[in-house]
Amino acid sequence: MVELLAPAGNFISLRAVLENGADAVYFGLDDYNMRANAKNFSLDDLSQVSKTAGEYGAKTYLCTNIILNEKLACELESNLEKISSSEIDGLILSDIGLIEDTVSHGLEAHISVQENVTNSYTLKTLKKLGAKRAILSRELSLAEITDITRKSPIETEIFVHGAICMAISGRCFLSYGLYGRSANCGDCLQPCRKNWTLTYEEGDDNVVNFSEVEDETFIVTGSDDVSYRTNFFSPKDMCMIEYIPELMKSGVASFKIEGRARSPDYGAMVTGIYREAIDDYERDPLNYNVRDEWMDELTSVFNRGFDTNFYFNTPFEVSEDNQAKYIKKDIGQVVNYYNKVGAAELRIWDDLKIGDKIIIQGQTTGSITHTIDSMQIEGESVENVSKNSNVAILIPTKVRKNDFVYKLIERESV
């Protein structure tokens, strides 16, 4: 059975993805991972991460996937004993020099996509060094992945959903060149996601397209200053939900969702949908069908539009801004939850009405999406509630005091 591997940027996200069916979670440690701008975890948090994941029978993989200088490599090696004692299952490594030390401490060694593994010969070498798994390069086609996995002596892992970097396996100097903030050390400011201006040398009125893709679209928008702007550095997000059967037949051990820097509701939504898809296929592969609602739900959370990356052809569409159908608005906090009646008391600082869709998030609760179908104030049913009120709502899933409450608002109405 394939493993569904989900991201956790903090304890709320951790609980959210586990509640929605993740078989394993991956997460960062301060100073050692490619998401320095995420909240991440400290060494002292790792035992609690292991304990929480253990409640769901899920495995835990710690990202240590930046380019390590001598100082950081020495620090990481010296911390392996404490990492091991926290009962974390394995490390995701971008530096093969630490494989032996990792394994000697009883930890699985998984090789990061940063290593750009593109052939079975590399996998055979990694096996000799002690690695258990390698995350394959995101520049490979599905046919190449299937062939490499068939020959591999160790497990392989692939990304199936989330943001795609403009650079090969994420190795990029754009952020460092512009801001002195290194992507290779986890501190990318993502200048590629901005609108860029195109200018042409005097006398050059042609835009030359060397692509072999016949239906290529290259989005360029004219500006008032007679220049042009475009998001040509920013690829669309990967989404492979419609190709679960093809991915399952590839033989890879793990499907990975990108998104440690994204919100808990994003992790909950995406993990839950891929869980449903994998389970549907495993129950009845001959009659597997893609559910219409899956794509609708995936487009409701943050995304830059969707593509299949390099799986079937060279990607050619560039992204625009966030394409999510909804935005989240911070509107309140949970005051109490009454188990006997299945109701939560909320303190809200924005208007709320029957039919509104809300998200409740907390470290123990994770992320729960709920449509308001019943509200009361002082025992009386109400249809609308004004801001700066306390209101009780029926919600079957337990939430906790001080959990955050957000309202989902359609982008068109913002």
Image (spheres, rainbow, N blue to C red):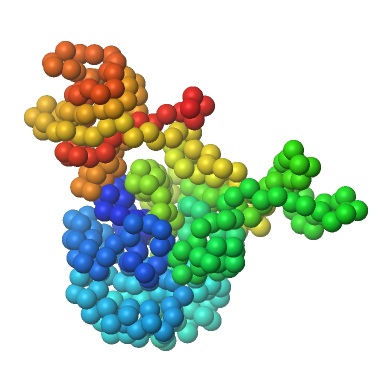
Q: In the orientation shown, which residue stands out farthest toward the right? A: 203
Residue drawn at (50%, 65%) of the image: 181
In the shown orientation, is residue 189 left or right of residue 266? right
Residue drawn at (30%, 55%) of the image: 10
Q: How many marks?
A: 0
Q: Nearer the viewer, residue 86 or 213?
A: 86
Name above or below for residue 390 compared with residue 134: above
The quarter holding residue 129 reads bottom left
Is residue 171 something one can see in this rendering? Answer: yes
Percent of width and height locating residue 311: 58, 58
In the shown orientation, is residue 291 left or right of residue 192? left
The quarter of the rendered structure image containing the N terminus is bottom left
Percent of width and height locating residue 383: 28, 14
Q: In the orientation shown, which residue stands out farthest toward the left? A: 340
Is residue 294 something one can see in this rendering? Answer: no
Percent of width and height locating residue 112: 44, 71
Q: Nearer the viewer, residue 351 or 315?
A: 351
The quarter holding residue 39 reads bottom left
Q: Nearer the viewer, residue 245 or 133?
A: 133
Name above or below for residue 123 compared with residue 326: below
Q: Nearer the viewer, residue 274 or 219?
A: 219
Percent of width and height locating residue 245: 48, 52
Residue drawn at (56%, 42%) of the image: 321
Residue drawn at (44%, 35%) of the image: 327
